[in-house]
Image (cartoon, helix red, strand yellow):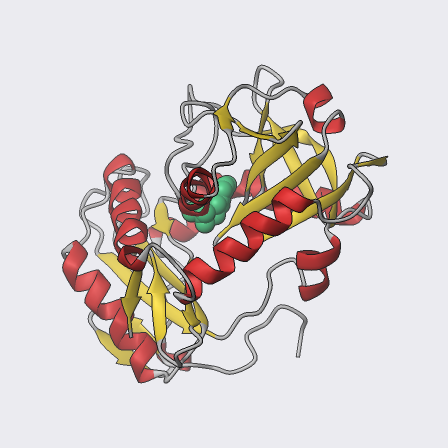
Amino acid sequence: MFPGLMADKYPIWLDGEIVPYEAATTHVLSHSLHYGLGAFEGIRAYKGEDGRSAIFRLKEHVKRLFDSCRIATIEVPFTEQEICDAILHVVRHNKLAECYIRPLVWLGEGSIKVAALDNAVRVAIAAWPWGAYLGDEALERGVRLCVSSYSRIGVRSHFEKAKISGQYVNSVLAKREALANGFDEAILLDAQGFVAEGTGENIFVVRDGTIFTPPRGSSILAGITRDTLLTLAADAEIPVREETITRSDLYLNDEVFMCGTAAEVTPVREIDGRMIGNGRRGPIAARIQKDYFHAVRGNHSNHPEWLTYI
Ligand code: PMP
């Protein structure tokens, strides 16, 4: 077994029906495999203290999938409601109490010309158990980051608000570079040199009790976890400012944390060899992390609207 490979081969929802893991395939001449025009999501389900499992912010994720497809000029052959139902169906079918869910929309075989206006639009939804993306230890001890030599894809030629498959070459290369240099994760600056985000996470810094994060209008994915944390910070009466962040701000602060569906809320203990705060999870990161894990599990949460029970 290679590290990172799914532990078990769970059945997959493919174009309207559940098929065995081995049957969820596509042809080598699938258009998206060559040119990257596809869209995907990353969603999680958690089990609460009451024993019930729920998918976190399902509707928002499915809406973003359709928004990504709209930007990518892909017409999804299902409605948003049908995709929500399909996601619930595959999680129930696989009897998963806690899992990661990966919907993918892509163009199948047909024309291999660039425009490929008539190729079939395919949809798959996979779901499998998946622990902490950056490791269990990372959630407590924090991770070590580097500022990447790659810039975050620019707003002039890419779509920062869409999870379009081909755009992720940027993230894959930045992540590989960070790992090769001994770091856990990379932070990408935008074309102007301002802090954008991680390869699959949004970023927050804390200075003098205030949380700062790059504005929604910058070169960042409008993360659903980011939005969740902004709400949780407001609930906890922690001041938040959506503001441009420079590389100096990354080094000169009390705390840094990253967030994303996969990465959840992960503290940062070091950036480019500079220790952040006292080198461990700070009090605001700890508070936000605790509130986040309560919210996703529906434990002591004021936001039942975020949960779709399985
Ligand atoms: N930025 C990028 C580039 C991402 O791929 C992700 C993961 N979807 C995020 C941020 C975090 O987004 P979310 O909280 O919606 O998972």
Horizontally, residue 208 falls left or right of residue 298, namely: right
Query: Picture quarter containing residue 127?
Result: bottom left
Whether residue 99 is visible? yes
Residue in front for this viewpoint, 192 or 23: 192
Q: Position of residue 117 (x, y in %)?
A: 20, 42
**Left or right placement of residue 66 versus residue 51 in this view:** left
**Residue at image x 46%, y 25%?**
215
Q: Quadrant of residue 223?
A: top left
Quadrant for the N terminus, please: bottom right
In this rendering, the answer to whether 243 lies above or below 37 is above
Q: Is residue 79 above or below residue 20?
A: above
Percent x, y of residue 216:
41, 28
Can residue 109 be seen at all in this image of the molecule?
A: no
Q: How many marks?
A: 0
Instruction: Give x and y (percent) for residue 113.
Output: 31, 41
**Split into 4 quadrants, where in the image is the C terminus?**
bottom left
Q: Is residue 43 above or below residue 20?
A: above
Toward the viewer: 263 or 269?
Answer: 269
Q: Residue at x 18, y 47 (%)?
A: 75
- Rendered image quadrant of residue 205: top right
Farthest top residue in view: 192
Left or right? Give the position of 109 relative to 156.
left
Give the residue displayed 44% in from the left and 76% down from the top: 49
- Residue 109: x and y in percent read 29, 57
